[in-house]
Amino acid sequence: MNTRTIKATLMKGAIPKYLPGCPDRLNDLTIKYPRLDRDKKERDLQIQDLRLLFKLNQFSVAKLSPKLNYKSCWSSVLDKQNVELTLRVFDYTNVAAFTLHQSKDYIQSNQTGDFIALICQVWKLINVNIPWKGVRLNDRDSLPLVRNDPKFNVTSIIVHWLDNWKSLPFTRGKLTAQTFASFAIQALLYQNL
């Protein structure tokens, strides 16, 4: 690279793709989702909030969301299929960081943090692989489902929430039909135990 190309790439508005914070066409991506409490009012999950959280933590000494990285915020089409990057986004440390930054007025809304907390909660309920996982983690939500468990009520609420989400009148910013179906099948399986 010669100096002429470096000057051209560092001009205002011409930030190269490999630098953190570079603009792209998905900067204003918003995912609409309904509230969990049987209310038809939709809420917004903004990818821009997640990227702002990454930028706030990027140069700080104490990382509030240590699992969040550049690839999980600015992922390509192939990277979006990587489960590890998805789990970096849907982590409770990000929820705590959103809450703290909202209290300091760095982030205006905590709707993105609420959505991440909701998905984390659903994931903990349905992702129990071994019977002693909840004991090892000291987490009641990670215990396996048994009959007469209050978590069975949560699965019916999740199915209703997914139906509300699928019936929203938006075509962009929603989950795919396959993702809706897999969530619904998993929740219905737990509901019919």
Image (tube, rainbow, N blue to C red):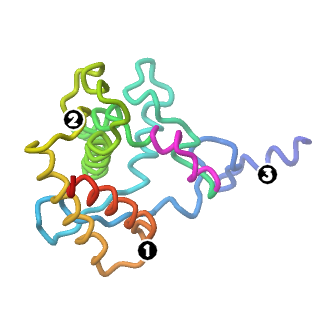
* Residue 151 location (% of width, % of height): 15, 45
**Which comes before the other along the chain, label 2 or label 3?**
3
Please state which amino acid type lies under the numbered disc 3.
Ala
Residue extent of the magenta highlight: 78-88
Dots 2 and 3: beta carbons under 8 Å? no
In this rendering, would 33 be left or right of 5?
Answer: left
Q: How far apart are marks 2 and 3 (CA)?
A: 53 Å
| Residue to which mark 1 is pinned | 172
**Which comes before the other along the chain, label 1 or label 3?**
3
Helix, strand or loop at label 1? It is loop
Q: In which quarter of the image is the N terminus?
A: top right
In this rendering, would 138 be left or right of 55?
Answer: left
The question of residue 123 being in magenta is answered with no
Q: Nearer the viewer, mark 2 or mark 3?
A: 2
Q: Which of marks 1 and 3 is in front?
A: 1
Identify the disc placed on residue 141. Answer: 2
The residue lying at 62 percent from left, 58 percent from top is: 77
